[in-house]
């Protein structure tokens, strides 16, 4: 699906659209009339209520956190909006990837567009302009508690987009046309005036879960593609092991009553269709890492599907504080805690645990392929035995180190909490830490699966006429891998080959070639 433009309505944003804007710079269309009118109506009501001093609104005509009981004059509300951004520019660490920052921007724009934030359309239009001109703020990776939303990373975006009440002021940094500039200079070169804020707008720009949601969208996209590649790598390994097909019999998996398991077994049967290596060496059964692939990878797919639904619901949620709601011809304001990221923190942890298992079982197959006692007649370390060559042994070392790294990274961040803001914020989700760890785990898993591709292709080459005896799907993957990485006749550096295969996984080349081969096979 090639998405070239995305409409912001506050109600319809999808994970695919976020990814398209983040990675492919899909164009974000101007706000539609209905969205603008909805935003203007709630904003006008709040404007009138503040000017008439009808009500005290948290964070609009009061201070924040422990200063919630300090009421301010309406004329100071604009400065309060800018000050809350300045006060939250406190991030540390390496910059986030630009694709995550762009995802945060489109998610935040969509959230505000619901109208419940009661801010001007100009706030959303500012973020849209920055996305379309590709002004990407530099955002440090650490500093969010994931509870009052992702205040710190969002503030590093807002500081570029806005200015002081009199103009100018600190602007952070931003990327524009390959240059890292001050935010002010980047916006000037892009022809986008920085925005002067009025009441509530500063809070609405930063009080939300956009970093966790952005990481979640990109993680879902990567995880879905990664498990597809894991299926293909597993199929190649099954071929290399001359595995027993009975473990994937449809009756066995139908009896499990588990969708992911049933689908994974079906996918493996399809990938292996026509194989002359499967069942070539009859025996009773294989090790768990072979015969239990559907029971291991199936639940991973179920977990990803569960997290997808939660994250996509969050994209179209109203989550800053307070929120404004229509009541007949009037409106009312409600102060609460929709910004709390506990749910997203759970999703980050669930995905981390689930996708780590993909690497765990993949590494077991790579290890077994290298081990004569386990690989059904293949040479030790998948290299010709002459005493000179070490073979692929140390590739599996690297994979093992990544698997072990994941065990630490996948420790659930959501079980942690540290009170902040004089105990106003006495429980926080730590979901932003979980998001960072999840993205690191996905990168680790990608390389572990790349190592399995490397080992499986090498093992197939040691089977007699192995490449000519593969099933349709495994053959298509093997053919593409061998275009990029040749069989090892002697020892040589492996890092470049592992990275080449990891890059293939990060793209969709293998998936597309395999699916095309399967479709051709069905039509013949």
Image (spheres, rainbow, N blue to C red):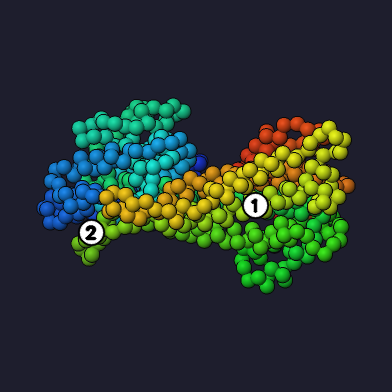
- Res 1 visible: no
Kindly identify the residue that appears in the image at 32 percent across and 29 percent down.
Answer: 184
Looking at the image, residue 305 lies above or below residue 375: below
Q: Earlier in the sequence, mark 1 or mark 2?
A: 2
Residue 384 in the image: x percent, y percent?
A: 85, 38
Q: Front-most of 413 and 255?
A: 413
* Mark 1 crowdedness (10 Å alpha carbons): few <14, some 14-19, many ≥20: many
Q: Front-most of 343 and 403?
A: 403
Quarter placement of the C terminus: bottom right
Q: How many marks?
A: 2
Residue 128 in the image: x percent, y percent?
A: 37, 42
Q: Residue furthest bottom?
A: 255
Looking at the image, residue 382 lies above or below residue 176: below
- Tell me the residue that label 1 is attached to: 360
- SS for callout 2: strand
Looking at the image, residue 238 lies above or below residue 505: below
**For this view, does 57 lie left or right of residue 506?**
left
- Res 397 visible: yes
Q: Front-most of 368 and 1?
A: 368
**For this view, does 354 lie left or right of residue 67?**
right
Q: Residue furthest left?
A: 52
- SS for callout 1: helix
Give me the C-alpha separation between circle 1 and circle 2: 49 Å
- Tell me the residue that label 2 is attached to: 333
Looking at the rendered structure, which numbered label has been put on residue 423?
A: none
Residue 453 is drawn in which quadrant? top right
**For this view, does 104 lie left or right of residue 453?**
left
**For this view, does 246 lie left or right of residue 412?**
right
* Mark 2 crowdedness (10 Å alpha carbons): few <14, some 14-19, many ≥20: many
Looking at the image, residue 471 lies above or below residue 135: below
């Amino acid at each position: 699906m090639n998405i070239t433009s995305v409409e912001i309505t506050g109600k319809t944003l999808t994970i695919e659209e976020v990814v398209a804007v983040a990675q492919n710079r899909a164009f974000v269309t101007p706000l539609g009339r209905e969205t603008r009118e909805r935003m203007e109506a709630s904003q006008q009501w709040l404007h009138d209520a503040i000017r008439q001093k009808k009500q005290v609104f948290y964070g609009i005509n009061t201070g924040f956190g422990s200063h919630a009981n300090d009421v301010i004059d309406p004329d100071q509300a604009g400065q309060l909006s800018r000050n809350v951004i300045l006060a939250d520019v406190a991030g540390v660490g390496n910059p986030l990837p630009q694709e995550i920052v762009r995802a945060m921007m489109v998610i935040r724009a969509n959230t505000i567009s619901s109208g419940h934030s009661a801010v001007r359309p100009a706030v959303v239009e500012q973020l849209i302009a920055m996305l379309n001109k590709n002004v990407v703020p530099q955002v440090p990776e650490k500093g969010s508690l994931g509870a009052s939303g992702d205040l710190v990373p969002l503030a590093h975006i807002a500081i570029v987009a806005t200015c002081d009440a009199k103009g100018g002021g600190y602007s952070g940094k931003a990327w524009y046309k390959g240059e890292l500039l001050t935010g002010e200079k980047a916006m000037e070169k892009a022809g986008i005036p920085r925005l002067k804020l009025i009441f509530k707008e500063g809070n609405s720009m930063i009080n939300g879960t956009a970093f966790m949601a952005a990481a979640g969208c990109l993680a879902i996209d990567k995880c879905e593609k990664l498990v597809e590649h894991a299926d293909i790598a597993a199929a190649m390994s099954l071929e290399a092991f001359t595995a027993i097909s009975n473990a994937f019999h449809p009756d066995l998996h139908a009896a499990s009553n588990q969708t992911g398991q049933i689908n994974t077994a079906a996918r493996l049967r399809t990938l292996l269709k026509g194989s002359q290596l499967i069942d070539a060496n009859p025996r009773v059964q294989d090790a768990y890492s072979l015969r239990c692939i559907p029971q291991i990878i199936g639940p991973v797919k179920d977990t990803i599907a569960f997290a997808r639904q939660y994250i996509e619901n969050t994209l179209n949620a109203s989550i800053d504080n307070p929120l404004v709601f229509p009541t007949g011809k009037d409106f009312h304001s409600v102060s609460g805690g929709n910004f709390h990221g506990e749910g997203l923190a759970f999703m980050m942890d669930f995905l981390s645990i689930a996708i780590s298992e993909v690497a765990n079982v993949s590494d077991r197959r790579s290890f077994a392929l290298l081990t004569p006692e386990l690989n059904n007649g293949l040479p030790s370390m998948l290299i010709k035995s002459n005493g000179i060559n070490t073979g692929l042994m140390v590739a599996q070392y690297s994979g093992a180190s990544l698997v072990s790294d994941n065990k630490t990274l996948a420790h659930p961040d959501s079980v942690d909490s540290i009170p902040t803001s004089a105990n106003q914020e006495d429980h926080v989700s730590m979901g932003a830490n979980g998001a960072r760890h999840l993205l690191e785990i996905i990168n680790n898993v990608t390389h572990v699966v790349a190592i399995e591709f490397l080992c499986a292709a090498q093992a197939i080459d040691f089977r007699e006429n192995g490449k000519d005896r593969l099933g349709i799907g495994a053959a298509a993957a093997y053919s593409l891998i061998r275009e990029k990485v040749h069989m090892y006749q002697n020892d040589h550096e492996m890092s470049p080959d592992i990275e080449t295969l990891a890059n293939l996984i990060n793209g969709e080349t293998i998936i597309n070639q395999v699916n095309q081969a399967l479709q051709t096979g069905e039509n013949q």
